[in-house]
Amino acid sequence: MATYLAFLRAINLGAKRVFPKDDIRRVVESVGFEDVATHINTGNVRFESRMRSRQRIERTLEAAFAADRGFEVPTIVFSTAEFREVARQTRELDDANPGLARHYVYLLKDELTEAQIAANEGRADGRGRMVVRGRAAHALLQPGYQDGAVDPLGAASLLGVATNRNANVIGTLAEKWCGA
């Protein structure tokens, strides 16, 4: 059995896309995954599986979520080793960029092409910049960016299927679920 983390996109944002964490846990267990745990109500799930294909795990979860909820739930899966690396990069970027107002980490379903990376990283301006590392894109936002705006650089539309978490959540999950 291997341990994986799944991140669900666009749930619990309004009255029509409600997916409480207890229901998420129930659905993940219903497809045969074990030792399922959730963290807060934003679609963070840890589980064990005999499956080894990330894409197969994502398809299995997405089909189960759609059947249960009646709407699509894009799902991004990382192994614990992959997620530890995302957390390490997040800490490294925080240390190298003191004084950030916010650090959001977009978790990507697929790695970006060189052209997509260049387009994202080319969004830099006085509000902040994007840094892409593997299947994570980091929005490093400076003081004075539009508070409350998660995507002031307009980069999210260039990332493909992605969901974001703040740097604190990334660190908490890595420590709690990956021993990082």
Image: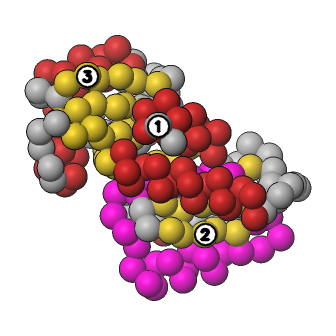
Viewer can see residue 76:
no
Above or below — where is 33 with respect to 135?
above
Q: Which residue is mark 2?
A: 131
Q: Position of residue 104 (x, y in %)?
A: 63, 51
The part of the chain drawn in magenta is 103-128
Q: Which residue is mark 1?
A: 179
Give the mark, 2 or 1, whose residue is nearer the N terminus.
Answer: 2
Whether residues under marks 3 and 2 lie with C-beta atoms below 8 angstroms apart, the answer is no
Label for residue 107?
A: none
Q: Residues within 10 Å of mark 2 (few under 14, many from 20)?
A: some
Give the mark, 1 or 3, whose residue is nearer the N terminus.
Answer: 3
The quadrant in which residue 74 appears is top left
- Looking at numbered disc 2 in the image, what kind of residue is underneath it? Val
Q: Position of residue 99 (x, y in %)?
A: 86, 55
- Looking at numbered disc 3 in the image, what kind of residue is underneath it? Asp
Q: Which residue is mark 3?
A: 35
